[in-house]
Amino acid sequence: MQKIGVFVCWCGSNIAATVDVETVSDALAREPGVVFSTNYQYMCSQAGQDMIQEKIRELGLTGVVICSCSPRMHEATFRRACEKAGLNPYLVEIANIREQCSWIHKDKAVGTEKAIILGRAAIAKVQLNAPLTAGESPVTKRALVIGGGIAGIQTALDIAEAGFPVDIVEKKPTIGGKMTQIDKTFPTLDCAACILTPKMVDAAQNEKINIISYAQVEEVAGFVGNFSVKIRKRARFVDETKCTGCGLCTEKCPQKNVPNEFNQGLDNRRAIYIPFAQAVPKVATIDPNYCTMLKTGKCGVCSKVCTAGAIDYRQQDEIIQQEYGAIVAATGFEPISMEKFDEFAYSQSPDVVTSLEFERLMNAAGPTGGTLLRPSDGKHPHTLVFVQCVGSRCDGGEKGKPYCSKICCMYTAKHAMLTREKYPDTEVYVFYIDVRTPGKNFDEFYRRAVEEYGVHYVKGMVGKVAPENGKLKVQASDLLGGRQLHIDADMVVLAAAIEPDRSARPLATMLTASMDTNDFFTEAHPKLRPVESPTAGVFLSGACQGPKDIPETVAQAGAAAAKVIGLLSRDHLTCNPCVAESNELMCNGCSACEKVCPYGAITYIDKEFRGPNRTTLVRRVAQVNPAVCQGCGACTVACPSGAMDLKGFSNAQIMAEVDAICK
């Protein structure tokens, strides 16, 4: 005999404001199998949990339905509470009457009716629930960090400090990311290289950290605690174990007209190169797109001058297969392409640059040695115009991004201050929509730019930039002054929006991780689990999850590392018992389920069955590995014979919910 208890939560006014909880609990009390139904202000509180436990013991409840918030929020809480009272935790069902009901309805009568229907569906399902027992799986005590920027470096260092080995996979020849291209950081104006380089060296020298540079992740299989990852290490055509980083080959290479991506294409490099002086690892790399030897078989200068014998033109890509317990995505960001913003004449004049290009022009290690010169003629500019929000906060259309890129206001203030400090004879204008300074000492930093350095901040947008007679004609609006401005500028600097690195989406597919509409990784919960992906064992670090400055990135990197350490410190993990199972008598061996399984949990075996007249039949049937299966349910949908079912979410249970909703 079923004995079901129903507990309706008010969630303060979150539910009670638009749902009559008394009516809901009274209506559900009349459902078949329900022996107790009540409501309480905060069911997730200790008092609420104690009430549930008391009724389980007192009435001998065989199932519990909690009408409350999303199961993503408190399902684990209620399951633990019921387990303490002796009830199998998988005999608990959550009816989401907050996110799916009270939050989307203003009419109380409509909200109440829907809450009753959702509760009725949960009762119908719990009547068919069966006790499930969670198994255990071992944990591989090694972590993978994908991305070698400041986020990835800090995450790896923190994990290694706890004693766990960690691999950093970086697609470029050196770690360091975007921070290596920056001159100074706000709001302290300290040297970016001075604070980043020691971190890079620490990562290289840490015996627990293995840097796999010039590589990318190709395949991810497995599950939390037991990921199997295939990494392609691209051929450098230089033996890393032999190269001393002396740089002689980079000086003698005759092919010297290769655009230098580290300097944003503002100068050229050789076909064999070391990206910058502090590169880690400091190993030369041959660019196969420009190397004469690799393309025609004629040259070999770098091989002749290399005293260490490190040049290897026959080197091939290497595939590395490794097991990991946890994976951290730290893929970073890229500035948005300026090709859709030709009103600013970016493609028409070399004197219109992005903020990252301006960083390189101001950097002592940049193409001009730190002297600010116009790219067009090498002359010193006297009037600079900075344009904010280029590609950010664009409503509708496909031109830009709807979000604020968060860091632009501050780095523009930094650029304006550094320009005025180094070149007092320059006039600097900043056109902005709003100035956003949400950080410690950020607002004071911005006010210094205005009050101390005399930067002209103009609230308004630049409508057009036109090259004319060696000048950039800037047409803009001054909203506070109510006038149109026409400025003859020597340089225009565009604060380009930032977007996720292009490798983020294919990586998310491999990790089965969620992404938002802007291709940022989605966190498991924006407030309570901000560094975890909804995919167990996958964590998020840095700008792959959303726009961030350096301090926020480092803070999130440490948080992600803490989560990884907590996972790797365990010897075994409790498995999800809600896994697929195959009815071998119904299975026709078609392989449809095997093809759609994203975790590789399904295999096929030949099994003997007793046929008519005592004959033996051998049939090909599906077999599920419960340690690998993550209960996604894809196989149950694909199975044409109905042989595949999901424990805890069986076809019968789902149809019972549908029937309860429709009655």
Image (spheres, rainbow, N blue to C red):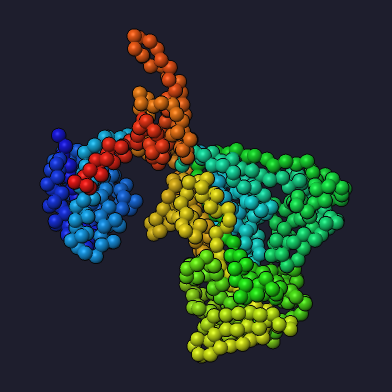
Indicate the quadrant where residue 414 lies: bottom right
**Rendering coords of residue 289 (x, y %):** 75, 52
| Foreground pick, 655 / 306 | 655
Residue at 43% from the left image edge and 26% from the top image edge: 589
Q: Quadrant of the N terminus?
A: top left
Query: Can the viewer see residue 421?
Result: no
**Rendering coords of residue 540 (x, y %):** 49, 54
* Residue 420 in the figure: left or right of residue 30: right
| Foreground pick, 489 / 175 | 489
Furthest-top residue in this view: 613
Residue at 38% from the left image edge and 36% from the top image edge: 636
Indicate the quadrant where residue 601 lies: top left
* Residue 597 in the figure: left or right of residue 291: left
* Residue 38 in the figure: left or right of residue 262: left
* Residue 383 in the figure: left or right of residue 40: right
**Rendering coords of residue 394 (x, y %):** 50, 70
Query: Can the viewer see residue 3?
Result: yes
Residue at 16% from the left image edge and 54% from the top image edge: 24
**Rendering coords of residue 473 (x, y %):** 66, 83
| Foreground pick, 414 / 235 | 235
How many badges with numbers are in the image? 0
Q: Is residue 121 above or below residue 478?
A: above
Residue at 46% from the left image edge and 38% from the top image edge: 596
Q: Is residue 447 above or below residue 199?
A: below
